[in-house]
Amino acid sequence: MVASEMHLGIFVLGAGHHVAGWRLQDARAGSENLSLLIEIAKTAERAKFDLVFLADALNTGPKMHPSMMVRLEPITLLSALAMVTSHIGLAATASTTYSDPYNLARAFGSVDHISGGRAAWNVVTGAFPEAAGNFGHAAHPSHDRRYAIANEFVSVVKGLWDSWEDGAIVMDKAGGQFADVSKMHSLNHKGEFFSVTGPLNMSRPPQGHPVIIQAGASEAGRELASSIGEIVFAVQQDLKSAKAFADDLRALAAKNGRDPRQMKIMPGVCPVVGSSEADAKAKLASLGAFTDPAAALKVLSERLGHDLSSYPLDGPVPVLPQSGIMQGHAVTLAALAKERQMTLRELCDFTSVAMGHRLLFGTPEQIADGLEEWFVAGAADGFNVMPPWFPGAFDDFANEVVPILQRRGLFRTEYTGRTLREHLGLPRPQHRGAVKNDDRIAS
């Protein structure tokens, strides 16, 4: 990786990130629309993006964001996208609260094998309490308990990915040896939340471990992100707070014995590109005209972790207690509303565009300037791009903004590697059991 080059991911919500983006005349929509999702992935690869990023949640409802109301299971979708791309990284969200470590290790390991080393796992603890009932749970675990589970869960998954040493599958036809079982390891994990024997019935993934993504912003979330996150998906609104967050996270990573350069901080950004600033504002206005206030209020309620339906829309944004749900979004949006003295309606309209992430609008040069400012200041190693609608808003960014970043020497013009780790400049993890002999299975 060249130190002066930023990283770019495309955050894919099939109906667009704006709550009404799908209603535009030239928009195509749907998180089940495979042809659209393939087109997005191919556009991102043509523009030399680092990765395609798929969000997920394990619930739905009548006022859910259109992109999340109905959607394909993301790890399955990654396998389909792997067949029509060759270089771009493939990332998906999976919950540590409502998953099993063995099955998840197999799933992401399979995507890494199928794609030739391009898989990434966005580790989440589950932001929606409604998911509990879908898995037979009486209640959603508390915030701190979810993060404690996540820590152990990730450790187990990494251990399972190391069930086999590199080169263990020899397939020696002459000697009749398919695998060198002296290089196979049992995990034999017994912890507070999980008991997993292993080994995984899969050879070591091409990347060693698929890349780990994390988006924690609470105290527990930052601790988890700084200890395991190789990409950190952040929500920030202004340069000062973004720089403070990045500096704090890098210091925490160093405290945890990690090289902070091996953690890529990538805030979300929603770009609206126009031929002029007025044109971009007109596009935003057209989106606002289609917005369903109830749906927009539901999105804001999710981000703040409280039902806001009883508060007057034209009154001030209420001061709310910490909910334990999406704390990063809640803190950022509350600070924004206080700073700009926004009404609840104004904050609702703002959130409906980019779900609380940074909004950039204007000419391609203005968008590029906004990204460069944060990158040069050290507030970000790159960005997760969140188009308000597809495919047009993303095409505008890929076709008009990316070439400016390339001309400025801020973004790659060609891939120089094949794996996601190579794109990000991350080392391939050493097999942690390769030097131990006491847990090897005798041949």
Image: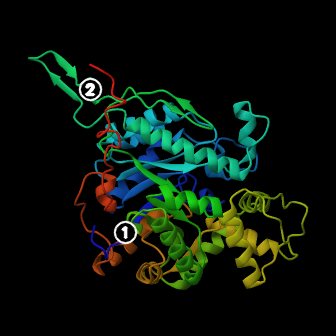
Which quarter of the rendered picture does the N terminus lie within?
bottom left
Q: Residue at x 25, y 60 (%)?
A: 415
The residue closer to the viewer here, 96 or 277, is 96
| Side of 193 relative to 12 (left or right) | right
The residue that label 2 is drawn on is: 182
List x then y, in percent, for residue 352: 68, 65
The residue closer to the viewer here, 42 or 109, is 109
Can you say whether 74 is above or below 371 in the image?
Answer: above
Q: Residue at x 18, y 23 (%)?
A: 171
Residue 17 in sight: no
List x then y, in percent, for residue 136: 73, 30
| Side of 321 relative to 28 (left or right) | right
List x then y, in percent, for residue 319: 84, 72
Q: Residue furthest front?
A: 438
Q: Secondary structure at mark 2?
A: helix
Using the image, tell me which numbered label, if any, was put on residue 435: none
Q: Residue at x 71, y 50 (%)?
A: 64
Identify the amino acid type marked 1. Asn
Q: Secondary structure at mark 1?
A: helix
Residue 322 in sight: yes
Q: Residues within 10 Å of mark 2 (few under 14, many from 20)?
A: some
The residue that label 1 is drawn on is: 399
Quadrant in the picture for residue 69: top right
Identify the amino acid type marked 2. Ser
Q: How many marks?
A: 2
Q: CA distance from mark 2 to mark 1?
A: 52 Å
